[in-house]
Amino acid sequence: MPHRIRRWALAATTFVMLAGAAHAATDAEIARGKYLVALGGCSDCHTPGHFLGHEDKTRFLGGSDVGFAIPGRGVFVGPNLTPDKATGLGTWTTQQIVTALTTGVRPDGRVLAPVMPWRAFAHLTAADARAIAVYLQSLPRVAHRVAGPFGPGAAPDVLVMTVLPGPAYAALPVPGARKSP
């Protein structure tokens, strides 16, 4: 009987090792993720300086310094996507990153800000979503905690891009414009 148990345990261990090896990130998968991240424009919202015209490549995908204001919802700053454990995705599993990317739900249950295009990413193939996740996990760690999120009415300490309905935008004063008599 002990011989059968040892044989079963060896078979189970071998299966687990092979299954794990089958899911290890490959160079090709990481390269595919890098391509998809570039194509998806992830650095636009997740790299400091991008919106100001001076992208900080030393903090690539390390979290933005600009927030998006959504009326009634608040201001949201693109978070750090690097594997830094304190300020980024370093404590998230590959599957948790895939889930957030494709369903808009973080591991803590919070729903991502509406500006995050997870609804579009929900159409990624499982292989492409995983490639993005393993690429993010392969990045150099950047220790950068982004500001916010800021609730409605809060005073953000970052530059804010605002999403406004057309009539509200049209009603904004134009600096330097003269009112006609």
Image (spheres, grey):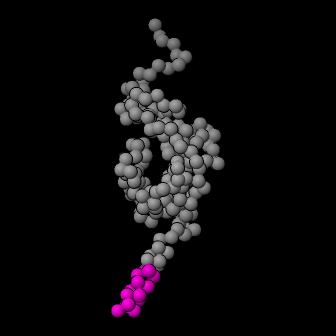
Identify the residue at image location x=59%, y=36%.
52
Q: Is residue 133 above or below residue 105?
A: below
Q: Can see residue 128?
A: no
Q: Which quarter of the picture shows residue 129?
A: bottom left
Q: Position of residue 23 (x, y in %)?
A: 47, 71
Q: Quadrant of the N terminus?
A: bottom left
Residue 159 image position (x, y, % from top left): 53, 32
Task: Name which residue lies at 59% across and 53% down.
Answer: 141
Image coordinates for residue 144, horizontal then vertical, percent: 56, 45
Indicate the quadrant where residue 51 lies.
Answer: top right
Residue 86 x/y as whole percent: 52, 50
Would you place residue 85 above or below residue 4 in this image?
above
Q: Going 53% across and 33% down the picture, which residue do you hit? A: 158
Residue at 49% of width from left, 75% of height from top? 21
Boundaries of the magenta span? 1-15
Q: Residue lying farthest front?
A: 2
Q: Within the magenta stretch, is there residue 159?
A: no
Say left or right for 50 vs 7: right
Residue 6 lies within the magenta run: yes
